[in-house]
């Protein structure tokens, strides 16, 4: 219990400010930190003694933050369905736009799983290349390549 308290005191503030910088939301940062230490406590018996505690904490936090942001995105998306579109027509009744959007999402399913995930994080969830790179542990250049290739592949598929 004393070891956990010491780890909490050492990493709570660092983790909070790190998450705040990346999530740009105090709520997501607070929630991430709390859930991280809860999960750390629950998994304390299975932690690897070969991997530094700080690395394990930040890995847990990254996973939790991605989950929280994904849930927030879905919640915001569903709330947006009740607002009017920019043309004054409720999106549910704008059939042409809905059909076009369905085509885009259908074409997105043909992307490789990683490319689709990177593209969704960038274009649908509004993540920066740097944030995606850090979340997925890949280089920003790889993120850029995935997005460029996804756009190229979608444009090609939507031309027909």
Image (cartoon, rainbow, N blue to C red):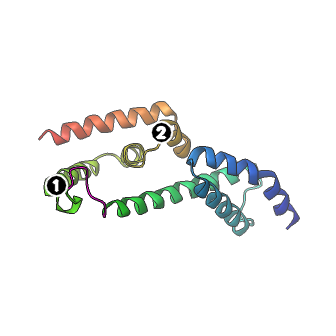
Q: Which residue is mark 2?
A: 128
Does the rendering let one see residue 11? yes
Q: Position of residue 23 (x, y in %)?
A: 56, 49
What residue would you read off at disc 1?
A: 99
Task: Report the number of discs.
Answer: 2
Residue nearest the viewer, comparing 127 with 59? 127
Q: Quadrant of the C terminus?
A: top left
Magenta region, main secondary structure: loop
- Which residue occupies the extreme left position in the image? 160
Query: What secondary structure is marked by label 1?
Result: helix
> In the image, is 116 to the left or to the right of 155?
right
Q: Residue at x 37, y 63 (%)?
A: 79
From the viewer's perspective, is residue 114 above or below residue 82?
above
| 55 left or right of 64 in image | right
Asked whether 102 falls inside the magenta stretch, the response is no
The magenta region covers 82-88
- Image x and y of residue 123, in percent: 37, 44
């Amino acid at each position: 219990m004393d070891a956990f308290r010491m780890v909490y005191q050492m990493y709570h503030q660092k983790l909070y400010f790190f998450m705040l910088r990346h999530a740009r939301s105090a709520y997501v940062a607070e929630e991430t930190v709390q859930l991280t230490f809860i999960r750390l406590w629950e998994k304390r018996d299975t932690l690897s003694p070969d991997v530094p505690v700080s690395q394990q904490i930040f890995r847990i936090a990254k996973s939790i933050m991605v989950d929280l942001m994904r849930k927030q995105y879905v919640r915001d998306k569903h709330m947006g369905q009740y607002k009017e579109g920019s043309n004054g027509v409720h999106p549910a009744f704008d059939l042409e736009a809905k059909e076009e959007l369905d085509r885009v999402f259908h074409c997105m399913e043909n992307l490789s799983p990683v490319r689709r995930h990177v593209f969704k994080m960038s274009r649908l969830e509004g993540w920066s290349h740097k944030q995606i790179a850090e979340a997925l542990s890949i280089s920003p250049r790889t993120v850029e390549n995935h997005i460029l290739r996804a756009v190229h592949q979608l444009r090609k598929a939507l031309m027909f």
